[in-house]
Image (tube, rainbow, N blue to C red):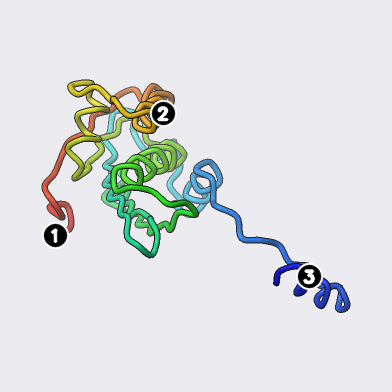
Amino acid sequence: MIGEMAVELSEYDISYLPKTTIKAQALADFVSKLAGISVEDTSKDQKWLLHVDGSSTIQGSGAGIIITSPQGEDLEFAIKFGLKASNNEAEYEALVIGMSMAHEAGARHLLAYSDSQLIVKQVEGTNEAKEENMIQYLEQIEEPKTSFNYFQIVQIRGRKYQG
């Protein structure tokens, strides 16, 4: 089907490019430009807030991410992942992407909120990751975690942060 479309499109000097998944760094670069918040505008000691909520359904997986600057400006994102993921995997994806975006926007002190008890306890180190995919996600969190002068993750119940 796609091959047939490519042949038909080539007649008009049009080429088909498949949709690719947005990588965390590209998204973080976009946020940095979109935010319009200069790193110099924020004190290095001021806390930024990150709210993440990963979701997985039969239609696919994705995440909601809200980054709040020290000035109270909210950057809100809804991301559809180009992969099948469990709820926990989607939550980890949201956290990795959200941390990267917050850092690019200028955050150096980050307080993250998640409604996943499993993810919060694994990131805190109070629960051990046992499944291979959870171990890999936990390893992915370590690098962005160390890029902050301060990082804390807190579990919230359900949609507490959406007031």
- The type of residue carrying mark 1 is Gly
Q: Position of residue 88 (x, y in %)?
A: 29, 43
Q: In the drawing, does residue 43 fall left or right of residue 5?
A: left
Q: Dot 1: few (<14), some (14–19), or many (≥20) neighbours within 10 Å? A: few
Q: Position of residue 54 (x, y in %)?
A: 31, 50
What's the distance in space between the residues labelled 3 and 2, CA to CA? 37 Å
Q: Are marks 3 and 2 in contact (CB under 8 Å)?
A: no
What's the distance in space between the residues labelled 2 and 1, CA to CA? 33 Å
Q: Is residue 95 above or below residue 73?
A: above
The residue identified by callout 2 is 136
Q: Secondary structure at mark 1?
A: loop
Q: Position of residue 77 (x, y in %)?
A: 38, 57
Q: Is residue 107 above or below residue 27?
A: above
The residue identified by callout 1 is 163
- The type of residue carrying mark 3 is Ala
x 43%, y 38%: residue: 100
Q: Which mark is residue 45?
A: none
Q: Dot 3: few (<14), some (14–19), or many (≥20) neighbours within 10 Å? A: some
**Towards the viewer: 78 or 50:** 78
Q: Are marks 2 and 1 in contact (CB under 8 Å)?
A: no
Q: Which mark is residue 6?
A: 3
